[in-house]
Amino acid sequence: MNNEPKSPARQTTDSDEQEALQRMICEGLAPIPLPAADAAGLRSRLLQRVGGSARRHAGLITVRAGDGSWRTVIAGVRSKLLHEGAHGASVLIELAAGATLPVHRHQHLEEGIVLRGALQLGELNLLPGDYHVSPPGSRHGRISSRSGGLAYLRGSSLGNTRAALGELLGGLLPGAGPAAHTVLAADGGWETIADGVERKILWRAGDIVSRFFRLAPGGRLPAHAHDCEEECMMLSGDAYFGDLLLQAGEFHLAPRGSEHGEISSEHGALAFVRGHELVPWATRA
């Protein structure tokens, strides 16, 4: 075996061969010029597709993770408004370690999901993926976080000074009011509703349903219309709603009368959705 180092001449030859090979690869990847007519046709089809997507998404509201601004509620607590509706606001609320929210009484049905860290409601310790709902008139004790936490709230008074003040004053009145309800992430209750798609019912209020959807990689749900407003919070993973991509930490609202294309996920996803049961276009009268 010859263990002698290569000569400078041989080293230069190897380098030249690598450079020539890279040049050949780059030339092979160079764009192929299209005839003017083909280029114009391709551009027209792309613009039509973009226009169609814009029309389908008209009225849909999406708040990306980096969108919006945070405001201080009290020391150690801040919130970000996602959407304000007739039955309270949808917000993100973040508590620093040791922060506390005072006792209050709910004006609206308030739903909350811990996204990060942990929150303490009396003896109840809520972790990521845990769901808690407080009916109108229910009284909440102090909410605190020993280590810091982030949660999504729907039906909150945050963002409305008068409503928030009313809830604080209501908290001074005696009586617990209607019972709250908690569904832990570790609880069962998942049911398969399509190939690669599971659903977990969290709360029903008339014909409005709050639930988790869990999509395995490759899972799909059919295109559907919305008979009422539908709210979605992506908890983990990512999913396409038609050609609109939603990722973890992003909020999406579809107004009544709007439609969604097929929902699919390449990598898997977990989402909270509140609205009517999904009604595929194919099954509508």
Image: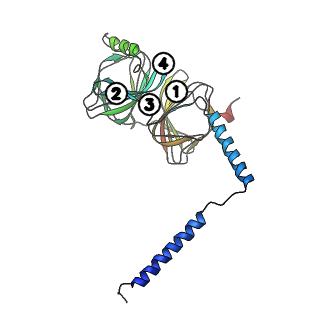
Tell me which numbered mark, 2 or 3, is placed earlier along the sequence: 3
* Alpha-carbon span between mark 3 and mark 4: 21 Å
* Alpha-carbon span between mark 2 and mark 3: 13 Å
Tell me which numbered mark, 3 or 4, is placed earlier along the sequence: 3
Q: Which residue is mark 1?
A: 209
Local crowd size for mark 1, using a 10 Å CA cut-off: few (<14), some (14–19), many (≥20)? some
Looking at numbered disc 3 in the image, what kind of residue is underneath it? Answer: Gly
* Residue 87 seen by the camera: yes
User: In the image, what residue occupies the spot 40% across and 25% down?
Assistant: 181
Residue 124 placement (x, y as % from top left): 31, 28
> In the image, which is nearer the foreground, mark 3 or mark 4?
3
Looking at numbered disc 2 in the image, what kind of residue is underneath it? Answer: Arg
- Most extreme residue toward the bottom, as rendered? 1
Looking at numbered disc 1 in the image, what kind of residue is underneath it? Answer: Val
User: In the image, what residue occupies the spot 57% across and 70% down?
Assistant: 24
Q: Which residue is mark 2?
A: 78
- In the figure, is residue 170 to the left or right of 32? left
Q: Quadrant of the N terminus?
A: bottom left
Which structural element holds mark 4?
loop
Which structural element holds mark 1?
strand
Q: Which residue is mark 3?
A: 68
Q: Quadrant of the C terminus?
A: top right
Q: Which residue is mark 4?
A: 87
Looking at this view, is 158 or 49 the one in front?
A: 49
Tell me which numbered mark, 1 or 2, is placed earlier along the sequence: 2
Q: Above or below — where is 82 with respect to 217?
A: above
* Alpha-carbon span between mark 1 and mark 3: 27 Å
